[in-house]
Amino acid sequence: MSELATITTARGSIKAAADIAKSLKESRPSLSGAELDLKLEDLVTSLVDAGMRLVEMQDAAIEKGKGISELKEALQAKDTLNRRSDSRYKVDELGKIYRYEVNVAFHEV
């Protein structure tokens, strides 16, 4: 489910729960035991659904955070690598190569 759809669903569940709670408050004296139980069941269902959607949004935010961290690390690593043709290498303070990689999957034409 897309993030926007998840947010919309969560908001809808929270609104439904609020509407049910408002309805319960306004009509409590006139409700029978079974009607009250049904309304409370609807309220709990809406709140559980909203909670599940919030967990989905939290998971998506965590995944995005991980992706951003990985991209930042890759960008920092790129700044420290020297590149020649399809090879990458790092040099120490004295200019001596201490790490060398050949990227066989990448070839410039």
Image (tube, grey):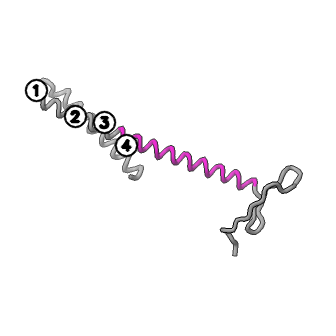
Q: Are there few (<14), some (14-19), or many (20+) residues within 10 Å of tag 3?
A: some
Can you identify the residue that label 1 sits on? 30
Secondary structure mostly seen in the magenta stretch: helix
Can you identify the residue that label 3 sits on? 47
Tell me the mark number nearer the camera, choosing from 1 and 4. Answer: 4
Q: Nearer the viewer, residue 109 or 100?
A: 100
Can you identify the residue that label 2 sits on? 41
Work out how far the residue at label 3 is from the one at label 1, CA to CA, in angstroms: 24 Å
- Quick check: is 39 in the magenta stretch? no
Per the rendered image, the range of residues in magenta is 51-80
| Residue 25 left/right relative to 11 | left
Amino acid at dot 4? Arg
The residue furthest bottom is 109
Q: Quadrant of residue 18?
A: top left
**Label 4–label 2 contact, CB within 8 A:** no
Residue 53's label in the rendered image is 4
